[in-house]
């Protein structure tokens, strides 16, 4: 699963919900149905805790979050991923793919930590991870009134309203900056509500432990987004602060951060049907997209993204082939592109299979009928869906062009492209030539028809105008959506009778779930667990399936290790950004790390499905076994309280 939000900035942001796919979205009498939903901390008290207790939850809402502390304090964000503190001394566990770029950056051809793994024998050997930071929530403030007032004061021009909101957002964030804190201001429910989230941000982060790539990425792109999985997708980092305890940049005199809360690591594991919770920072979902927006995503945006990224990967790999240093240098970029490419493939497949457009059309018809049946509702909401659909169709009319324009600008940035960037630019120009006339870009057409006069420098210069226009267009559309999307959310809220969870936006959430298998298609049933034995049966000693000799030797020494569980499934509601999320049992103990979804659930960004929405987690007992019997780290095990 990508550590970054999976929705492109070119994909329209809108508001509508699939009724047939989103079976249990709303709060019910007596509490909320929790298995679907990426719940805000402030919504936890409204969940059905009596029902959750029967399922095995032994924590109260306040023990999970009371406004400033609780179990959620141990959940942190690390470079677009989720993670958690697992010791008082700032030790953090996340996914291997979340730490991939840091491991890659610390590697050389002579000392390849990606291939060989890394175990720090002491604090002094821990490796700085430049560019990595860790943040966690300290509290929330409602700033809805301030944000709405800023929009109103800006007048009627949609672009100016949007810019005024962004300026107020920046002001509120700056106002909350302090020696030990930072803040972000974020919208919920399409901007009907806004929160200022106070955070602690730690910028001295160091690599502590990482398994070899053949463990951390076992199955490679073959198994990515698939089940069954046998991937040990984990890595450990540590956060450091100044000797006075304040956040600071990397410095020799820094000391491990004293975490206010950390997770107890369980050695008990979980069984089928057990309750689990996923804590973390899901990146982006599109649960409230209209039928028009989903149709554009399925037919236009994702197919183009898949095609472009496939070609990018081929070109970059071809350019680096045979040069070990180049191959190492591009590893992170290839991994990221490949992840997004397969995600795009899964989105198209899932949206079509689940008939999301048809379901959204059904729900939109039902809501429209409900509005027209009541005079007061008609006065308030009549026409809101039509306005939103009009905006979405306008976005769809340029979604491919804007995606290619942004990509081409990236390839040309800095002047004349060279090497692989030249090939990518040529590929993108070929894609431009295939666009329908309505989405063509005059500057590109003129440059091509003019015999490419002035070279790529001339083309890059000519793109400044359409890039500026694209930015103004987005500001204007975002300003128009502030009103219409918020009113559409309000209509849905009244239609359903209760409010519901907002789309994911990289803020702290909780998903409640059960350990559960699934049936992807007729005649096929997937169990919720995989084992070391299954991993060894996949082993071919090469490529994506090459079990390290050290693992094989450990199993030969202790054959019972074949029964050890490697990964498990649950029906938790997750998306990109949940990579590395701690998975806890009913007592709040760490039992696994979320790292992926199954292929059938990739389109879950548009709607959770009880039959096919499954997320994949590495069992923490497999992690501990590797740290004990394969690549020993006794000091870390002791630090985590594991015997």
Image: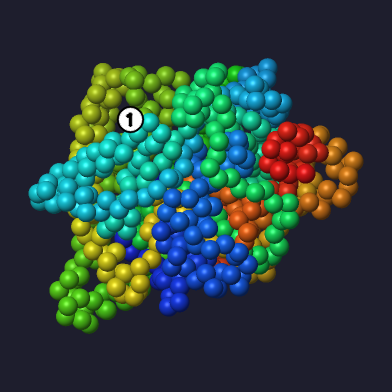
Q: Which residue is nearer to you in this view: 75 or 641?
A: 641
Above or below, comparing residue 347 to residue 170 in the picture: below
- Residue at image x 26%, y 21%? 458
- Residue at image x 51%, y 43%? 76
Which residue is situated farthest in the left direction here?
155
Please count the marks in the image.
1
The spot of residue 167 in percent (x, y) is 21, 39
For residue 522, side relative to residue 464 (left or right):
right
Callout 1: helix, strand or loop? helix
**Residue at which label 1 appears:** 409
The quarter of the displayed image where residue 529 is located: bottom right
Which residue is situated farthest in the front direction here?
244
Q: Which residue is nearer to you in this view: 569 or 539?
A: 569
- Residue at image x 45%, y 77%? 30
Report if residue 68 is visible in the image: yes
The quarter of the displayed image where residue 201 is located: top left
Q: Residues within 10 Å of mark 1 (few under 14, many from 20)?
A: some
Above or below, comparing residue 141 to residue 406 in the picture: below
Report if residue 299 is visible in the image: no
The spot of residue 232 in percent (x, y) is 68, 43
The spot of residue 66 in percent (x, y) is 45, 56
């Amino acid at each position: 699963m990508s550590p970054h939000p999976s929705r492109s900035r070119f994909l329209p942001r809108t508001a509508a919900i699939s009724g047939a796919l989103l079976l249990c979205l709303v709060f019910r009498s007596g509490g909320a149905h929790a298995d679907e939903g990426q719940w805000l901390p402030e919504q936890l008290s409204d969940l059905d805790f009596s029902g959750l207790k029967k399922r095995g939850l032994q924590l109260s809402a306040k023990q999970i979050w009371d406004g400033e502390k609780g179990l959620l304090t141990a959940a942190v964000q690390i470079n677009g991923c989720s993670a958690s503190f697992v010791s008082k001394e700032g030790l953090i566990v996340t996914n291997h793919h979340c730490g991939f770029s840091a491991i890659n950056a610390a590697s050389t051809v002579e000392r390849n930590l990606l291939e060989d793994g890394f175990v720090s024998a002491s604090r002094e050997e821990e490796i700085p991870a430049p560019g990595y930071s860790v943040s966690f929530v300290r509290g929330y403030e409602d700033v809805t009134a301030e944000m709405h007032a800023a929009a109103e004061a800006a007048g009627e021009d949609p672009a100016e309203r949007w810019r005024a909101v962004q300026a107020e957002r920046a002001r509120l964030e700056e106002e909350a900056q302090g020696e030990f804190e930072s803040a972000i201001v974020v919208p919920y429910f399409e901007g009907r509500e806004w929160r200022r989230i106070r955070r602690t941000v730690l910028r001295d982060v160091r690599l502590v432990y990482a398994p070899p790539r053949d463990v951390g990425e076992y199955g490679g792109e073959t198994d990515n987004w698939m089940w069954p999985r046998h991937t040990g997708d984990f890595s450990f980092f540590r956060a450091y602060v100044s000797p006075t305890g304040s956040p600071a940049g990397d410095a020799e005199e820094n000391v491990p951060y004293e975490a206010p809360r950390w997770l107890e690591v369980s050695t008990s594991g979980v069984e089928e049907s057990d309750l689990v919770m996923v804590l973390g920072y899901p990146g982006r979902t599109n649960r409230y997209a209209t039928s028009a927006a989903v149709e554009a995503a399925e037919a236009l945006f994702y197919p183009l993204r898949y095609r472009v990224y496939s070609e990018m990967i081929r070109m970059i790999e071809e350019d680096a082939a045979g040069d070990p240093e180049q191959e190492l240098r591009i590893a992170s970029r290839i991994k990221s592109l490949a992840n997004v490419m397969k995600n795009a493939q899964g989105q198209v497949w899932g949206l079509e299979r689940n008939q999301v457009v048809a379901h959204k059309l059904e729900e939109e018809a039902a809501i429209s009928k409900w509005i027209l049946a009541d005079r007061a509702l008609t006065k308030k909401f009549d026409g809101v869906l039509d306005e939103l659909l009009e905006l979405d169709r306008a976005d769809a009319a340029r979604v491919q062009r804007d995606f290619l324009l942004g990509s081409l600008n990236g390839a040309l940035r800095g002047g004349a492209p060279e090497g692989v960037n030249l090939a990518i630019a040529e590929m993108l120009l070929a894609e431009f030539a295939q666009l329908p006339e309505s989405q063509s870009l005059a500057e590109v057409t003129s440059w091509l028809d003019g015999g490419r006069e002035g070279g790529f420098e001339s083309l890059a210069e000519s793109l400044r105008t359409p890039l500026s226009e694209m930015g103004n267009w987005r500001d204007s559309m975002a300003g128009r959506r502030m009103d219409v999307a918020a009113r559409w959310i309000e209509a849905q809220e009244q239609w359903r009778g209760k409010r519901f969870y907002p789309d994911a936006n990289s803020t702290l959430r909780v998903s409640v779930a059960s350990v559960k298998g699934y049936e992807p298609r007729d005649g096929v049933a997937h169990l919720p667990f995989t084992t070391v034995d299954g991993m060894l049966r996949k082993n071919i000693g090469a490529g994506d399936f090459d079990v390290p000799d050290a693992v094989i030797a450990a199993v030969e020494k202790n054959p019972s290790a074949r029964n050890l569980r490697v990964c498990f499934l649950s029906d938790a509601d997750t998306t990109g950004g949940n990579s590395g999320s701690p998975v806890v049992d009913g007592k709040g103990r760490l039992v696994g790390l979320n790292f992926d979804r199954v292929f059938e659930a990739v389109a879950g960004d548009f709607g959770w499905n009880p039959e096919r929405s499954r997320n994949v987690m590495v069992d923490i007992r497999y992690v501990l076994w590797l740290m004990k019997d394969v690549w020993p780290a006794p000091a870390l095990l002791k630090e985590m309280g594991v015997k």
